[in-house]
Image (tube, rainbow, N blue to C red):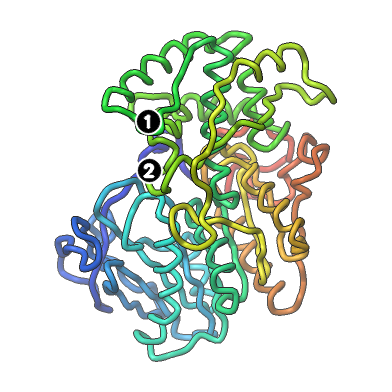
Amino acid sequence: MVRRAALVAALVAGFLTGSPATAAPPSCSAPVPSDTRPGYLVADPDCELDGSAFTALPGATVHTGIRAGAAYRIEVPKRWNGRLVVYAHGYRGTGTTVYVSNPELRQHYLDEGYAWAASSYATNGYDVGQGVRDTYALTGLFRQVTGRTARKVFISGASMGGHVTAVAIEEYPRTFAGAMPYCGVLGDAELFDWFLDANVSAAALAGVGIEFPLQPDAAYPLRFAGQVARIKAALTGTEAGRTWSDVLERRSGGERPGFPAAFAYWNAASQGGLPFLFSLYPGLSGGTAGIAPGNLTDNRRTVYRSTDGWWPTAAERALNESVLRVRRTATADPHLAGVPRVDGRPSVPVLSLHGVGDLFVPFSMEQEYARRAAANGRSRLFVSRAIRTAAHCGFTSAELSRAFDELIAWTDRGLRPAGDAILDRRKVASATFGCRFTVGVRPEYAPDSCGRGPAGTA
């Protein structure tokens, strides 16, 4: 689980990847220039980020290498069951060195007889399209490298890798038998609207004017930092700050247990000298996420609420009259350019997990996918599980392995697994929401009323 002290490094890092072998190298090779992306380096896939060797687990064989500017790892157990899991990693910042890493369920996959494969992708940044192409390419690469063909292929991905997963099963509907995104960006550009909402609502409540430049000038980040300092001073320990928390709760998934602790957890984090949520303000990049052909964000029709009554209060009306309104100039792409769109049209079973208090990729991403799937008549193919954690991707191996095993039972025997009613506002607000599939208590998530031991225990 990601701890606060390591939060920023864990969320937005980016560094290394590799070249082929099955035995541990005597030392790590220096990153090599990419043959597809000028200026990019590909780190040695036979080495971990700490410089230790990547080697096969007992009873397995590994294959590593570089293909089309992306490093890859493949691991096959001796008693292979003929199935493959491809893993899609999350966002790794905007550095120019790419590296491959192992899935959290590596040991579990091998224990159950599954082979797995992972790619570094050929680029960093929020390049979901490249992630989809490189992750899909693993299915053919597996055949080339191992000389075997997988009878079934599953896909799983975390965070931005969840976005990759959701797009991949729509772009290549006949390739995958099932999908398990977790802490995933399942609402595509809705994630960037969330970052916009957090910032403009804070500024309005603080009475501080902010801008949304479509082409930020060089001095804008410093100017924005000064505005944020005034916003923070106006909201810290004040009634306006408490209202902001209430607004964010509703914009990120609705009233739910543990939100005050989650809000405190994320509000205490920082990045680049800014409080964490302000460091993600889309106006800093013109709303392009660094890759879209224009501003993706829009709040012209957004109604900001801090209560759940039928009608907005006078204070809510005042907030909505004063908040900065932004118009999009670009949209999520229907294919793999820019920020790819997630239609919510799965053709295979999808079992997803999401943290109730995650405010980096908020719980509302899960609800958005559920709504899209329902609109497309695909609700029967989507199951979501709420986990009582405030951390981003802060799941235990027990939670992930149980979900994977039950996804397999669903695809093999039609046993649709249980999930949470994430679109039922009353159930989401229940004091026990998220208890059913959570294993253990996270120290950053409180209060807990599930009667469980520390994370990782029953």
Q: Residues within 10 Å of mark 2 (few under 14, many from 20)?
A: some
The answer to which of marks 2 and 1 sits earlier in the sequence is 2
Q: Which of the two residues, 103 or 272, is positioned nearer the viewer here?
A: 272
- 414 to 338, vertically: above or below: below
Q: Residues within 10 Å of mark 1 (few under 14, many from 20)?
A: some
> Which residue is pictured at 27% across the width and 72% down the height?
66
Q: CA distance from mark 2 to mark 1?
A: 9 Å
Q: Residue 339: x, y in percent?
A: 47, 52
- 385 to 130, vertically: above or below: above
> Which residue is pictured at 60% across the width and 32% down the height?
299
Image quarter of residue 174: bottom right
Q: Residue 2: x, y in percent?
A: 46, 42
Q: Residue 78: x, y in percent?
A: 44, 85
Q: Secondary structure at mark 2?
A: helix
Q: Which of the two residues, 226 or 404, is positioned nearer the viewer here?
A: 226
What numbered label is drawn on residue 360? none
Q: Amino acid at mark 2?
A: Val
- 53 to 438, vertically: above or below: below
Quickly name the residue at label 1.
271
| In the image: residue 351, left or right of residue 27 | right
Do labels 2 and 1 touch, CB within 8 Å?
A: yes
Quickly name the residue at label 2.
12
> Which residue is pictured at 63% across the width and 9% down the height?
239
Q: Residue 377: x, y in percent?
A: 78, 63
Q: How many marks?
A: 2
> Which residue is pictured at 51% across the width and 56% down the height?
333
